[in-house]
Image (cartoon, rainbow, N blue to C red):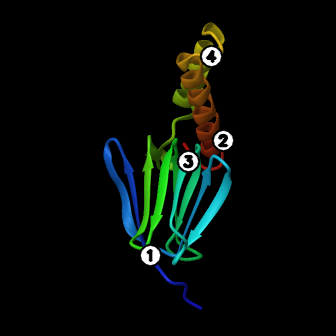
Amino acid sequence: MAKDRFQVEVLTPEGEVFNDEVEMVSTRTTVGSIGILAHHQPLLGMLEPTELRLYRSDSDVVRYAQGEGYVQVSPDGVLVLVEEAQDPGELDRGDLQDKQRKAEEALSSCDEGTEEHRRAARDKRRWETFLRIAGDGGA
């Protein structure tokens, strides 16, 4: 049985990453994982680093390593605004390990409660997540 399709757009500061119709969006908000189907109630949420999955069908899934951002669900479709969205196959484990190490160093060298500490903690979470995604099929 075919599922209703809806428009999804994924944008990063560099531009549009994805713009097509899908049957479902799977991502993670700050309060947990979410699956979005057609006719979902309007929603605005903050996104955590995770694997963003865009289901064109049960067998056609577009995957991205998703950074922090926002999701907006409206009657017109879903808008995903994220810091970055990378194809898992293009992730470089060595580069990610270097970024994670730098974030850990920054985290240990700044005072807790500062913006610098929050930024370093956020970066550390992102690179840990991207490394986990890269381990599941990235380069």
Residue corresponding to mark 1: 6
Secondary structure of the residue carrying tag 4 is: helix
Q: Considering only order in the chain, which callout, 3 or 1, is on the residue closer to the N terminus?
A: 1
Position in image of residue 64 (x %, y %): 51, 52
Residue 138 seen by the camera: yes
* Mark 1 surroundings: few (<14), some (14-19) or many (≥20) residues within 10 A: many
Q: Nearer the viewer, mark 3 or mark 4?
A: 3
Of callouts 2 and 3, the N-terminal one: 3
Residue reaching furthest right? 32
Circle 2 residue: 132
Q: Tell me how far mark 4 sits from mark 2, CA to CA.
A: 20 Å
Residue wearing tag 4: 107
Residue drawn at (42%, 50%) of the image = 81
Task: Using the image, determine if residue 134 lies above or below residue 61.
Answer: above
Q: Is residue 139 above or below residue 16?
A: above
* C-beta proximity under 8 Å, tags 3 and 4: no
Indicate which disc residue 47 carries. 3
Asked whether 30 or 28 is in front, the reply is: 30
Image position, residue 29 (x, y; %) = 61, 51
